[in-house]
Image: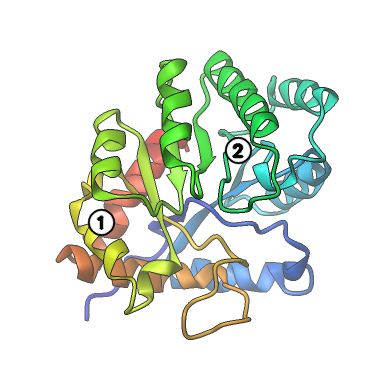
Amino acid sequence: MSTVQLSVLVDSHIHLDDQRFDFDRQELIKMAQLSGVGRFIVPAVSVNRFPAVLKVAEDHPTVSYTLGLHPYYIDEHTATGLEFLAKSLQGSGAVGVGECGLDYYLKNLDRDKQQKVFEAQVILAKHFDLPLVLHVRGAVDDVFKTLKKHDYFKAVMHSFNGSVEQAQQITEKGIYLGFGPAVCNPKANKLQQLIKSVPVELMMLETDAPDQPFYDRAGKRNLPIDLLRVNLEIAAIKGVEPDFLAAQTTANANHLFKL
């Protein structure tokens, strides 16, 4: 089996600021680095998490970060929070805006407010010429519609699980699609067929750690090193060498986030 060249992989979406990593964060990052994961993109999800995200990036040179307001926490987000986001992006080291977007899977989230908060972040990203890290669960069409409205496509749709047709329309605009542990489930036939249709030049790899547990590790957190498993699985689905997939997806992340 082919091995991945050391320090070539980029985890395009990992929540290293999560409190579940507080007791072993440094060791897990080091283990991943020694195994071939060279950089991590950590997206903030609310104003309250900005300090923790910044601290992780400050403590670990291989961590880059984005700042945003996640739709899960829509009840917490305010006009003051958006203003603070705008100020935080100005002159900061953030490499993107997010995690932001829409979530229609959870039915108790105010969709009108989600749209307003998301649209404000698209405008901010365009103003600062920063890429968007997009949450699109159950809402691929409306997220894409908003991007088209503002004619801004510098983005990655994280944990993408839409249709082949949606993927084609989205990637035609140059938007990247992120894939993670869900693809490793042998029952994920639809997702695996989707991945076959997506150009490698517009793919990114992620763990979404500590969330999105693997099918065979239910209830356990994902780890930074798990990106290697994602890389091997997707390479097998695409019929390419793991080294090739690692190098190409790293180049994609470097390009979008200007790493």
Name the residue type under label 1.
Leu
- Whether residue 258 is visible: no
Left or right: where 106 falls relative to 252: right
Earlier-in-chain disc, 1 versus 2: 2
* Residue at disc 2, secondary structure: strand
Image spot of residue 155 (x, y percent):
44, 33
Note whether 202 is above or below 227 in the view shown: above
Q: Which of the numbered marks, if any, corresponds to residue 253?
A: none
Image spot of residue 252 (x, y percent):
34, 42
Number of other residues with Cα within 10 Å of mark 2, as a class: few under 14, some 14 to 19, many 20 or more: many
Nearest the viewer among 228 and 68 is 68
Residue at (55% x, 67% y) in the render: 212
Residue wearing tag 2 = 100
The single residue placed furthest to the left in the displayed view is: 239
Left or right: where 84 falls relative to 125: right
Image spot of residue 149 (x, y percent):
44, 17
- Whether residue 180 is visible: yes
Location of the N terminus (image quadrant): bottom left
Note whether 85 is above or below 31 in the view shown: above
Left or right: where 170 falls relative to 149: left
Residue at (21% x, 68% y) in the render: 237
Residue wearing tag 1 = 194
Note whether 30 is above or below 10 in the view shown: below
Image spot of residue 198 (x, y percent):
23, 49
Number of other residues with Cα within 10 Å of mark 1, as a class: few under 14, some 14 to 19, many 20 or more: some
* Residue at disc 1, secondary structure: helix
Residue at (28% x, 64% y) in the render: 190
Name the residue type under label 2.
Cys
